[in-house]
Amino acid sequence: MSEKTYEVRTYGCQMNVHDSERLSGLLEGAGYVRAPEGADGDADVVVFNTCAVRENADNKLYGNLGRLAPMKTKRPGMQIAVGGCLAQKDRDTIVKRAPWVDVVFGTHNIGKLPVLLERARVQEEAQVEIAESLEAFPSTLPTRRESAYAAWVSISVGCNNTCTFCIVPALRGKEKDRRTGDILAEIEALVAEGVSEITLLGQNVNAYGSDIGDREAFSKLLRACGKIEGLERVRFTSPHPRDFTDDVIAAMAETPNVMPQLHMPLQSGSDTVLKAMRRSYRQERFLGIIEKVRAAMPHAAISTDIIVGFPGETEEDFEQTMHTVREARFAQAFTFQYSKRPGTPAATMEDQIPKEVVQKRYMRLVALQEEISWEENKKQVGRTVDVMVAEGEGRKDGATHRLSGRAPDNRLVHFTKPDEDVRPGDVVTVEITYAAPHHLLAEGPSKAVRRTRAGDAWERRTAEPEQGAGVLLGLPKIGVPEPLPAATGGCSVQ
């Protein structure tokens, strides 16, 4: 009998991406193999790992479920599972609207998926199981990681903030921190396997320690990462300005393998709007953080998230956001038009901004940020940088005879392919010769090529028998193994 196949479709933030790696690991531990790339529902088990942050998230889910219904009718034994934030929120509604779904599970019990699938098969009825609190920290579950050379490491789950536009705390729960020793043990194990870059992950990553009563726990964790031999790059996402303290800035500046990159969600430059958002900082505080980071790390690339058109936002409020962007000079900004999130206070606020007004403001902000991004990237021309070669980052690499990767500050660099063999995970030293708003070019010959243990790990993985394609991530290319110029956390995704 042939092995059963699975496909995981992921929507939303990095936490969901990381959870999908866990779901894949669980299914492979239960004997499933990944379906070939392009299977498009032609698998024995199809898992939707959902997001609930957009107003039309449920419509997108039910549309996809509807397309699978006839396929399931033609394929006896096929199973469909729905998990993640939307499952946590809607619960029984999913099975009522899509009775062909076999399993519904939430954000707190992803480890139960194989058991629920088997129970649904034996009992021949849908299994809906939503835990109200975390049953097992995600990183204790088996994992099918997407990259041989870079990895997510979850340090906390949940969030204690009450931002009025965000539903994540209601679905992920209060912040729960992982033991520092367990985090470092996982990183050391990953490095032993060949991983050279890790991204510390949390819904509010720099609040790490609040659950264990240590306000400096995050900076201590960064410094501890600096002592792990073989770990070349450390990143983290996403922090909150409220918890971004001077000891974290010092740890970043003084720990060589912590990269000079910071993603700091602004959301709005208006104090009035920030108050309505229930964000516990104001413009002056935010710009003060940026100033301190640049003083400690002059070449740091800083990125952000911005919401345009939050309820009640006036033209004056919007101009304050534009002012903050001009002052902060972000390397990149992830800019979103406000959309209602069912279940959040902001969804029922008065003075919802007309869509045409939001659109015009959005375009003005995007134009300003494009100009700034290009100007900041032009400052990189002439610099020599070490680029960690990535897999799949340059869609035109084949035609241009280039390779692509990330500089230490996480800027995307396309560079001339060296004469010698170079693998994802290896490091190539290049000189930047041209800048565009969203990438850099190094058109001359490479100055040096360093073959790494990470490259060896990639080579070993690609030499292994192919089990199928990667997890189908239904979102922009983010994180590991293709890091975002600035990765956005769950509560900052629009």
Image (cartoon, rainbow, N blue to C red):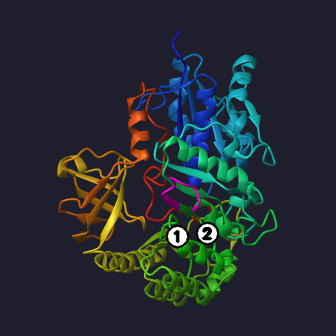
SS at badge 1: strand
Q: Could you say where residue 344 lies in the image, as x and y percent from the top left?
A: 70, 65
Q: Amino acid at mark 2?
A: Pro
Q: Could you say where residue 231 lies in the image, as x and y percent from the top left?
A: 52, 55
Q: Main secondary structure of the magenta part?
A: loop
Report the front residue among 69 and 408: 408
Query: Which residue is labeled 1 in the image?
Result: 263
Q: Is residue 350 visible?
A: no
Q: Give the residues in magenta.
A: 226-234
Q: Residue at x 57, y 88 (%)?
A: 288
Report the front residue among 196 and 352: 196
Residue 227 shown in magenta: yes
Quick check: 376 left or right of 161? left
| Residue at the limit of the structure toward the top, as seen here | 1
Q: Amino acid at mark 1?
A: His
Q: Could you say where residue 46 lies in the image, as x and y percent from the top left?
A: 56, 31
Report the front residue among 308 and 180: 180
The disc at residue 477 is: none
Query: Which residue is labeled 2 in the image?
Result: 239
Label 1: few (<14), some (14–19) or many (≥20) C-alpha neighbours in 10 Å: many
Residue 471 shown in magenta: no
Q: Is residue 65 visible?
A: yes
